[in-house]
Image (cartoon, grey):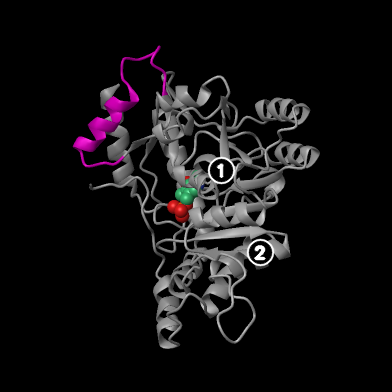
Amino acid sequence: MKIFLSKPHMSGQEEIYVKEAFESNYIAPLGPHLDAFEKKVSTYIGQDFYCVGLSSGTSALHLALIVAGVERDDEVWVSSMTFAGGVFPIKYIGAVPRFFDLNPKTWCIDENILKEELKKASNENRLPKAIIPTDLYGQSVELNSLEAIAKEYEVTLIVDSAESLGAEYLNGRKAGSGGDVAILSFNGNKIITTSGGGMLVTKNKSWADKARFLSTQARDKALHYEHSNVGYNYRLSNISAAIGLGQMSVLDDRVKTRRDIFNNYYNKLNNEAINFMPEPDGYKSTRWLTALTIDAQKTNVSHLDIIKMLEKHKIESRPLWKPMHLQPIFDGIPYHGSGFDESIFNSGLCLPSSSDLTKDEQQEIINLILEVF
Ligand SMILES: *Cc1c(COP(=O)(O)O)cnc(C)c1O
């Protein structure tokens, strides 16, 4: 590949922090850079938050479910259109997922369907233990209504903000501040990266403390190794955190660049057969990936034609996330919705959106797509 969908973009600052970590020999899953990284993210999201650095977004979600008290056979309701790492942890616990469609106005979980189903479930005494809405492609979910419904039915709200660090919901509220607990990912393809990593974000100090404890093998306070819980080896390494510290210094730049990339695609490709992912008034998406759909009624070019054509030019693009209710591993799991997510999966793609994509590279992609039309 010559042009990737989304790749790491270092600022130069990362190496300085990593060198510092080497010189002080903090080549361990704990250390000053990890503390500083957690503090930096927490300051960014909002002062009242506790942040726990973990080895991935997936492990962060696993621990979020555990600290929220989700247990075997509990139901967890989740956006169907998401990345598998945002759903698999439900299975790690032996809990049972139930999938939900998106709202066409936000491309995030449809809060109206959720509300209706919660009402029914409440009447039948089978409420879920938790709900996991995903901030899709860098756009915050409809937090006000989701937080209100979760409170009304006393269901834990776990927001999957793996793709949205740097995004804002209404009135400048940062993505990652939502729900009872949120998770972030610093995987190599995300908006900023620690090479691999994740974070659990919550205002609940005892949940944060418990996540920290469980992520380092659940060692009770004793001189010898004493365990009264099952633990995990999920802590973020101090070296990775050093990379993250450097990346945090350019987060807002990265968001701005990805939004500029989106706007450039939009301005040059917007036509009646192409629909871009919407951004509701007052929201600020990171535009982690530029996502769009092709209207088959209005053109004979399909999203797959574009993906294959770009691939021939060594340019990576991808279909949208395949909804989880269509995945073989989740065959037979209930799904609620009208299939909006299926329809955008069957017509949509993500275009290269790396923050270091050059103007010339982007123009080449745009020209190639215009030629197809
Ligand atoms: C990337 C991602 C995850 C998982 O994060 P990892 O750090 O790769 O484990 C979870 N949910 C969503 C929506 C993601 O995009």
Looking at marks 2 and 1 on the same chain, the residue that comes earlier in the sequence is marked by 2
Does the numbered disc 2 mark a residue whose Cβ is under 8 Å from ligand 1? no
Neighbor class of circle 2 (other Cα within 10 Å; few <14, some 14-19, many 20+) is many
Say whether residue 77 is left or right of residue 253.
Answer: right
Span shown in magenta:
294-316
Neighbor class of circle 1 (other Cα within 10 Å; few <14, some 14-19, many 20+) is many
Q: What residue type is labelled 1?
A: Ser
Q: What residue appears at the point 48 percent right and 70 percent down from the top-left corner?
A: 241
Quarter of the rendering occupied by the C terminus? top left
Looking at the image, is 5 positioned above or below residue 332?
A: below
Give the SS element for disc 2.
helix
Choose between 49 and 74: the one closer to the eye: 74
Q: Which mark is residue 103?
A: none
Say whether residue 168 is left or right of residue 344.
Answer: right
Q: What residue appears at the point 37 percent right and 38 percent down from the top-left corner?
A: 351
Give the SS element for disc 1.
loop
Mark 1 — residue?
285
Q: What residue appears at the point 73 percent right and 60 percent down from the top-left corner?
A: 204
Choose between 361 and 72: the one closer to the eye: 72
Looking at the image, is 349 positioned above or below residue 173?
A: above
Magenta stretch encompasses residue 140: no
Q: Where is residue 260 in the image (x, y as percent from the top left)?
A: 46, 44
Looking at the image, is 294 positioned above or below residue 109?
A: above
Q: Residue 208 carries which label?
A: 2
